[in-house]
Amino acid sequence: MEEYLHNNEQQPPHQEPRELTPREIVAELDKHIVGQDEAKRCVAVVVRNRFRRQQLDEKMREEIMPKNIIMIGPTGVGKTEIARRLAKLVNAPFIKVEATKFTEVGYVGRDVESIIRDLVETSIRLVKAEKVAEVEDQAKQAAELRILDMLQPLPRTAKMGAALGNIFGGPVNPEPKEEQSEEAKSKTEEIRRRRVWLRDQLSKGNLDKEMIEIEVEEAAPQMTGAESMGIDMSAILGNIMPKKMKKRKVTIAEARRILTQEEADKLIDSDEVNALGIERAEQSGIVFLDELDKIAGGESGHGPDVSRSGVQRDILPIVEGCTVQTKYGPVKSDFVLFIAAGAFSMSKPSDLIPELQGRFPIRVNLENLTRDDLRRILLEPEHSLIEQYLALLAVDGVEAEFTDDGIDALAEIADRVNENTENIGARRLHTILEKVLEDLLYDAPEAVSGKVVIDRNYIETKLADIVQDEDLSRFIL
């Protein structure tokens, strides 16, 4: 009866996502974002050019810089969603940063480098997740054996034999040559049978709710100040001070998750993960720089605009390309793609300092959403808003159904409120749907269950006060 399973088969290499053509990228974006065809085409070409660059020889590759983009349009029309979906589509490290963050009290130029540090952290997490997925089966087996040893330890001699068998690749019997007593043999056999039964129960998940005590490593204190300067204090202290362990009482299901993560960490090479993470951040990273219009201006030399101009000049080296010191080593931002966005209603891109303008050669305007666009947003994207609310209500046994005229009413009211108050685009649909379904979500499942039809009359009844009174409509943000 084999006690420990050995998996000598080589794990298949991680399959990188297939590089998509511009048409394929737009087709994928169409599944989640309604309209904005010009912006989709623009980002698709820029991303494809990054792939094309990677196929060139090294000398030519070093000369081709990414063409950064400014997306101009009001809030709620899809700027952030395009950038976020694009990064997910091509499996690229992605972070979103508000440019106004760096105008706050306490921020200085050096802190702008945190953009690249955050990007590297995201990239390393992405690479680590891929590496963990490659060794997941081995880690699960090792974690299961650890739990098995806690539930029913092997006899000491058998445990030594199994350990030596792992080292020498075959069965080893460290027991002394003299024969064991019949009682000892019987006891050992009984333990082995119990372990076989326990392992079967563990694999079926029958013991997942049982409690077990495990030892876990105590989290080290965060040295945020030092790490903001690119110094990994946790690694330095970890080499000096011994790791602290603490006992936790958890369910077997939770213990399996924790121990699987521990075993996976042992199986992957952290240095390789860090190196690949840095490389991916440098070559494939995408930074979405939001609210760029809020820091436009500032050439007058006095007043509050001075800080805006200062932030532009602090951001400029990062966008131009510089080397940032991180706790994983130096990272170059030369080939990071920056996608900036802003409404530019009170300013225009030409109000930015010339040097920064020059680093965003591609500009694309996003259109305001029409009533028809709002209707399509409710229905067409994968996991659309309507689908989400129907799924939430179904949990409590409410079978809700939106009629066609009900969908029309939602789009009309959202469009009307956007016109009469601040235009916040598709975000208006969230607040209107919450208002329409407020009573239904509250009453389920006690006061309402079964089928509920939501038509135009239902919606207009729920929103009667808001639709009739323009002032009240301002409360729908």
Image: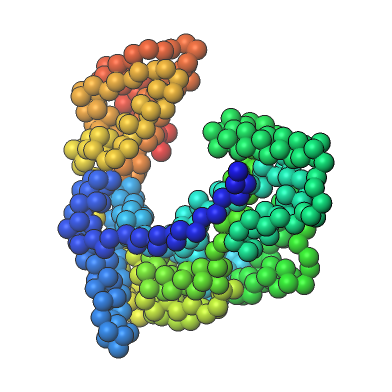
Left or right, residue 432 beside residue 168: left
Marker count (numbered): 0
Residue 420 placement, left or right of 27? right
Query: Where is 344 relative to 188, above or below?
Result: below
Q: Is residue 384 visible?
A: yes
Q: Front-most of 376 and 273?
A: 273
Q: Residue at x 77, y 72 (%)?
A: 240
Q: From the top left corner, tell me how far across and down residue 146 is, in percent.
A: 66, 47
Residue extending farthest to the bottom is 59
Q: Residue furthest front?
A: 178
**x, y percentage for residue 260?**
59, 50
Q: Is residue 46 visible?
A: no
Quadrant into which the C terminus falls = top left
**Of the pair 200 and 2, the residue shown nearer to us:** 2
Q: How is the image coloured?
A: rainbow
**Image x and y of residue 33, in percent:** 26, 47
The quadrant of the rendering that contains the N terminus is top right
Where's residue 376, x and y in %? 22, 38
Q: What residue is at 32 percent from the left and 56 percent from the top?
A: 89
Residue 10 or 262: which is nearer the viewer?
A: 10
Residue at horizontal 35 percent and vertical 41 percent from the top: 427
Instruction: Please name whichever residue, 421 or 239, is drawn nearer the observer in this view of the structure.
Output: 239
Q: Is residue 235 left or right of residue 113?
A: right
250 up-or-down from 259: above or below: above
Residue 353 quadrant: bottom left
Identify the residue at image location x=82%, y=51%: 178
